[in-house]
């Protein structure tokens, strides 16, 4: 029997949720999205879970959406993406509103929806070798995973547009200075440090933590409404001529030739 694509391990009052597709950079396909929602709901409903650490197995945190899965489901890929983002966005909503603080422990690369998971977390730590890259428009796609809601509120509008339009990659120290993560540690110390911080939070005022999280969420506005809009938009663009060319170019490791653009 194959290993689960999302593993949940309870260490006392701390739940360690690990994205477990290391051979694919923990890219998010439909099964990952479904299992991530199940993991989030399990943690939200378990009163003994008082802090959550979200990590990635292997060398990378999360490459974002599994574009190979997108392409293999063309031309009906828009329905697949709507279903995938429905589960993914529901998971993000659960994490954002549960009592337990959520910490992201970012190793290697966080791209696309992987950055959304970092932005969703209440606190985020990364290794010194970590790198962050939105990469959506590079593949002719639009953002999802709450990134268009969360990033402008944490990084500001201009910096968010720089990441989304120019696909600029952020190294660990830049991510810290921009406010995407709270702490940078040695790569080998990432998970121990994240678990140590989660353990400290697990001994805190959990109900007050949860109420504070929901107050912050309310002050930011309607995250769920924005994620519905993200789902519809990325689904449309994934099956457009521009989106199909962008995804094909990404998978073939070549420069995309978008319609109307002059190739260079």
Image (cartoon, rainbow, N blue to C red):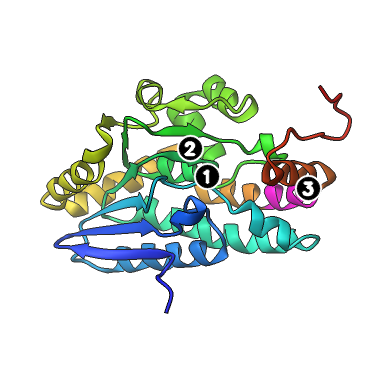
Marks 2/1 in contact by CB < 8 Å: the verdict is yes
Residue ID for mark 2? 150
Q: Secondary structure at mark 3?
A: helix
How busy is the neighbourhood of tag 3: few (under 14 within 10 Å), some, or many (20 plus)? many
Left or right: residue 43 versus residue 251 is: left
Left or right: residue 126 versus residue 263 is: left
Relative vertical location of residue 176 with respect to residue 194 in this rendering, above or below: above
The disc at residue 244 is 3
Relative vertical location of residue 125 with respect to residue 209 in this rendering, above or below: above
Relative vertical location of residue 71 with respect to residue 107 in this rendering, above or below: below
Which of the marked residues, 3 or 1, is nearer the chain's N terminus? 1
Span shown in magenta = 232-239
Q: Considering the image in quadrants, where does the N terminus appear?
A: bottom left
Q: Main secondary structure of the magenta part?
A: helix
Q: Is residue 110 magenta?
A: no
Closer to us: 180 or 257 = 257
The residue under the point 71% across, 63% down is 79
Give the percent coordinates (x, y) of residue 256.
Answer: 76, 35
Give the percent coordinates (x, y) of residue 88.
Answer: 51, 57
Can I make out residue 240 in this image?
yes
Q: Quadrant of residue 108?
A: top left
Closer to us: 57 or 176 = 57
Residue ID for mark 1? 146
The disc at residue 137 is none
Can I make out residue 218 in this image?
no
Q: Secondary structure at mark 2?
A: helix
How busy is the neighbourhood of tag 1: few (under 14 within 10 Å), some, or many (20 plus)? many
How far apart are the alpha carbons under marks 2 and 1?
6 Å
């Amino acid at each position: 029997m194959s290993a689960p694509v999302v593993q949940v391990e309870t260490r006392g009052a701390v739940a360690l949720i690990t994205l477990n597709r290391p051979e694919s950079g923990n890219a998010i396909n439909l099964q990952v999205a479904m299992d991530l929602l199940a993991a989030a709901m399990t943690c939200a409903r378990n009163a003994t879970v008082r802090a959550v650490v979200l990590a990635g197995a292997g060398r990378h945190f999360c490459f974002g959406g599994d574009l190979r899965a997108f392409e293999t489901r063309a031309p009906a890929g828009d329905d697949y993406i709507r279903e995938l983002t429905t589960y993914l966005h529901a998971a993000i909503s659960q994490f954002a509103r549960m009592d337990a603080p959520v910490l992201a422990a970012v190793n290697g690369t966080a791209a696309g929806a992987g950055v959304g998971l970092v932005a969703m977390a209440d606190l985020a730590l990364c290794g010194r070798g970590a790198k962050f890259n939105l990469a959506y428009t590079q593949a002719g796609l639009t953002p999802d995973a709450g990134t268009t809601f969360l990033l402008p509120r944490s990084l500001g509008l201009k910096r968010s547009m720089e990441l989304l339009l120019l696909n600029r990659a952020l190294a660990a120290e830049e991510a810290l200075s921009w406010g995407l993560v709270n702490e940078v540690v040695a790569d080998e110390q990432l998970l121990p440090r994240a678990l140590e911080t989660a353990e400290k939070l697990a001994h805190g005022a959990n109900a007050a933590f949860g109420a504070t999280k929901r107050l912050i969420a309310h002050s930011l506005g309607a995250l769920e409404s924005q994620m519905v809009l993200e789902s519809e938009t990325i689904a449309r663009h994934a099956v457009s001529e521009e989106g199909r060319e962008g995804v094909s170019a990404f998978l073939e490791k070549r420069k995309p030739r978008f319609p109307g653009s002059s190739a260079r």
